[in-house]
Image (cartoon, rainbow, N blue to C red):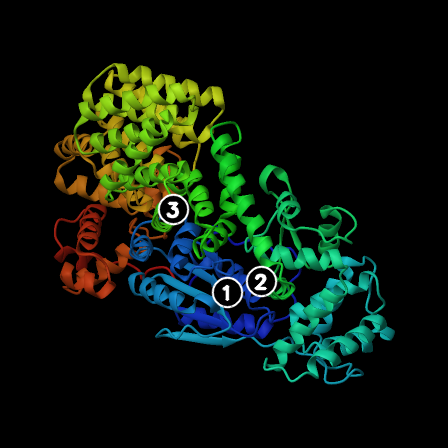
């Protein structure tokens, strides 16, 4: 794996504390990654697998042009959501077959995927890793787990505790554990230094804790209020008590439990109670959540803030900055949270805590629905992404037993456009479907869930007729104008997408009137966008007024995400009116918002291609159509395949094909169809020429690494079918790459590729 000059992409977090030791493990892990495609760091909880993996990933990221990507799985309760969680890390929208979508996305990428904490979903991680590695020759996977994945080709690197001196007076022994204790103690007690008098005591602490990094860090925090000798004395008492019991756990596990248990005993009763109760938040929490969900005991004094502050001081909680509303967000290490969960169950408080948790998230989801079309729209979306693990946990809990299903239905229905815009349609549909099956009571909440499920199903081409039938029945039963409008909107959208433009527009007009009567600005906006689109394809100039009204409504409510859709709708009608440059400016403005909604981005790039075609820029139009195709595939939505949109795409492609010729059009389209999301955005905004994007791997010819690989196989005389089988690609993908190679190299036949390769240097390392 050769180095790259530019900084790679990815999502690795910054290191908040110093990294101590592990020189041999670092070197061995990097050596294994250079030779193997799957490396698993194994070891007990608290031994430092995650920290080692992150340091390895940071050290090698320059070798991966497409970045190093971390997927944290500790928060994940449902094993079936492993592919969705990985896709979310890449910013991909969910699909019904997420693993296949990931394989397609990664097939020509060169990146490192870090799967952290696989042990509780090890089977699903193994299946996904095997599938992705088979699909992408440039993929490497670095996993951390208490158990091996048992995937063919997996290389194992056991992570042991830090080495400790053999005796308390061993001045020449290993110092890594001692250094870690000293470093963490100095962080909580400025001015702390290891003196000759303290050294024996610190070595004793590290030896008693068997070099387990998490246990050492928890003990080091005590230096804030205790001397080193006092830490030793109390630690000896605690460890002697726990490890003398005939426990089934392995010795190191008992040592870690003893260290965590000692931290628990040193907490006040109020701190112990909050530690246990906050364990129901797998994704972390803010102060408001703690105040609502974590009930104080009768003798607890002080506020929730005081208790949280105490737990932060004791390193039970860690604070993360940059959270919702610039408020603090608190998390526990997974091992610490597991301990709290055991204490919560033992105290008998879990049913009450989880009931309050459900109530809290019902209220949160409703507040998002009420405030999500306004100046805090982007802020709300950021918060829901941060709350995703908690939402999953509470939805699974509510769907797992009687009497709680209506809460799950309420939450999932209120979040309908988060599932849509966040690329989580299959997940949202899954919760809604299960809730509707389990909760048959005819309520307004059920009707709202039917609307949400219908909307998502229509957008993805899934069956929806029965959903709409029941929604219409409940709307009449409750005499609810908003529900009637919701039925008309979904029915109109389905009719429109099926190609009956006039029928769809009529239903959407009825929906718009109903939403105006109900006073729901979000749904008025959504229907205006749909109506503007239907009238655009009908050639009805009234659609321009609907688009302008939608833009004014988004601006009045300061809804940034919605404004992107409104700019798209206005641009369509400006293009239809013969002003392609003005339309392109509006589309550029929307793309420059860099929103996370992949469906919106696909709409925008697609419309920009139409504008370029009208202006005679056919090569650019072909590339933009290819880029839109790439984004549609990543979005998982199928709107772009539906009749009205597809017909305009076909007209645009036909014009470009006629101007460029079949070979040049296919090559331009295929090149941009291989772009990542960032590349599509940069190309659409003219921030990065296509030639530079194609040559990012450093080939003087402009060939990407994948194209160079295919060119070498072509030179050997292999057919497209044989190449596809060899590289685990689709035949269509190989065909597009071959056409692109010939155009880039200025060649006219496959046989010329071999001659070209003779005069070329080998690919860069």
Whole-number angstrom distance, CA of label 2 to CA of label 1: 9 Å
Question: Is residue 29 found left or right of 438 in the rendered image?
Answer: right
Whole-number angstrom distance, CA of label 3 to CA of label 1: 24 Å
Question: Is residue 330 found left or right of 741 in the rendered image?
Answer: right
Residue 117 tag number? 1
Residue, disc 3? 428
**Eye-nearest disc, 2 or 3:** 3
Quadrant hosting residue 717? bottom left
Would you call the spot at circle 3 few (<14 residues within 10 Å), some (14-19), or many (20 or more)?
many
Residue, disc 2? 334
Whole-number angstrom distance, CA of label 2 to CA of label 3: 26 Å
Measured as percent of width and height from the top left, residue 462 is found at: 25, 44
Quarter of the figure with the C terminus? bottom left
Would you call the spot at circle 1 few (<14 residues within 10 Å), some (14-19), or many (20 or more)?
many
Residue 211 tag number? none
Residue drawn 26% across the image and 27% down it: 612
């Amino acid at each position: 794996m050769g180095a790259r000059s530019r900084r790679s992409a990815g999502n690795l977090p910054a290191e908040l504390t110093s990294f101590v030791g592990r020189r041999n493990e670092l070197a061995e892990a990097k050596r294994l990654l250079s030779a193997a495609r799957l490396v698993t760091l194994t070891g007990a909880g608290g031994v430092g697998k995650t920290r080692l993996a992150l340091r390895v990933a940071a050290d090698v990221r320059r070798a991966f042009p497409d970045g190093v990507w971390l997927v944290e799985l500790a928060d994940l309760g449902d094993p079936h959501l492993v592919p969705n969680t990985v896709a979310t890390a890449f910013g991909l929208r969910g699909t019904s077959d997420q693993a296949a979508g990931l394989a397609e996305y990664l097939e020509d990428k060169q990146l490192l995927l870090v799967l952290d904490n696989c042990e509780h979903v090890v089977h699903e991680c193994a299946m996904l890793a095997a599938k992705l590695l088979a699909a992408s020759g440039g993929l490497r996977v670095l996993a951390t787990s208490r158990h091996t994945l048992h995937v063919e080709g997996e290389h194992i690197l056991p992570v042991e505790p830090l080495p400790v001196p053999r005796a308390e007076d061993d001045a020449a022994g290993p110092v890594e554990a001692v250094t870690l204790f000293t470093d963490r103690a100095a962080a909580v007690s400025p001015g702390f230094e290891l003196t000759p008098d303290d050294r024996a005591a610190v070595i004793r602490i590290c030896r008693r804790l068997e070099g387990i990094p998490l246990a050492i860090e928890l003990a080091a925090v005590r230096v804030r209020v205790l001397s080193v000798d006092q830490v030793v004395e109390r630690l000896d008492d605690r460890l002697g008590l726990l490890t003398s019991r005939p426990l089934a756990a392995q010795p190191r596990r008992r040592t870690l439990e003893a260290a965590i248990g000692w931290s628990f005993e040193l907490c006040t009763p109020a701190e112990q109670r909050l530690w246990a109760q906050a364990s129901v938040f797998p994704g972390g929490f803010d102060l408001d959540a703690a105040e609502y969900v974590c009930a104080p005991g009768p003798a607890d004094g002080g506020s929730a803030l005081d208790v949280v502050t105490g737990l932060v001081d004791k390193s039970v909680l860690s604070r993360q900055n940059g959270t919702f509303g610039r408020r603090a967000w608190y998390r526990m290490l997974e091992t610490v949270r597991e301990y709290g969960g055991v204490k919560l169950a033992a105290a008998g408080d879990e049913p009450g805590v989880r009931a309050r948790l459900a109530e809290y998230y019902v209220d949160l989801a409703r507040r998002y629905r009420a405030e999500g079309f306004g100046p805090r729209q982007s802020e709300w979306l950021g918060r829901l992404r941060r709350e995703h693990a908690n939402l999953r946990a509470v939805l699974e809990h509510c769907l797992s037993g009687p009497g709680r299903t209506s809460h799950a239905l309420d939450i999932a229905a209120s979040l309908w456009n988060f599932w849509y815009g966040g690329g989580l349609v299959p997940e949202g549909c899954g919760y809604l479907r299960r809730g509707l099956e389990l909760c048959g009571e005819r309520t307004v909440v059920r009707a709202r869930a039917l609307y949400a499920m219908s909307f998502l199903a229509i957008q993805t081409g899934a069956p929806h007729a029965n959903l709409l039938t029941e929604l219409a029945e409940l709307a009449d039963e409750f005499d609810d104008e908003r529900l009637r409008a919701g039925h008309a909107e979904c029915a109109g959208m389905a009719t429109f997408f099926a190609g009956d433009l006039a029928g769809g527009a009529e239903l959407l007009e009825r929906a718009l009137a109903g939403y105006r009567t109900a006073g729901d600005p979000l749904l008025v906006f959504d229907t205006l966008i749909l109506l503007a689109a239907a009238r655009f394809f009908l050639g009805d100039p009234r659609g321009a007024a609907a688009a302008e009204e939608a833009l004014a409504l988004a601006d009045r409510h300061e809804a940034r995400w919605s404004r992107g859709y409104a700019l798209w709708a206005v641009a369509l009608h400006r293009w239809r009116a013969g002003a392609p440059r003005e339309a392109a400016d509006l589309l550029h403005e929307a793309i420059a918002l860099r929103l996370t909604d992949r469906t919106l981005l696909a709409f925008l790039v697609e419309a920009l291609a139409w504008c370029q075609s009208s202006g005679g820029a056919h090569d650019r139009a072909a590339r933009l159509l290819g880029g839109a195709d790439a984004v549609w595939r990543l979005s998982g939505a199928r709107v772009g395949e539906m009749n009205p949109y597809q017909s305009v795409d076909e007209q645009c492609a036909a014009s470009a094909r006629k101007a460029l010729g079949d070979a040049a059009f296919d090559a331009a389209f295929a090149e941009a169809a291989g772009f990542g999301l960032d590349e599509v955005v940069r190309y659409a905004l003219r921030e990065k020429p296509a030639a530079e994007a194609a040559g990012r791997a450093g080939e003087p010819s402009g060939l990407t690494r994948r194209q160079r690989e295919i060119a070498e196989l072509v030179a050997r005389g292999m057919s497209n079918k044989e190449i596809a089988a060899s590289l685990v690609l689709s035949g269509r993908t190989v065909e597009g790459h071959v056409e692109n190679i010939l155009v880039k190299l200025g060649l006219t036949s496959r046989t010329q590729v071999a001659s070209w390769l003779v005069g070329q240097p080998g690919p860069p390392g």
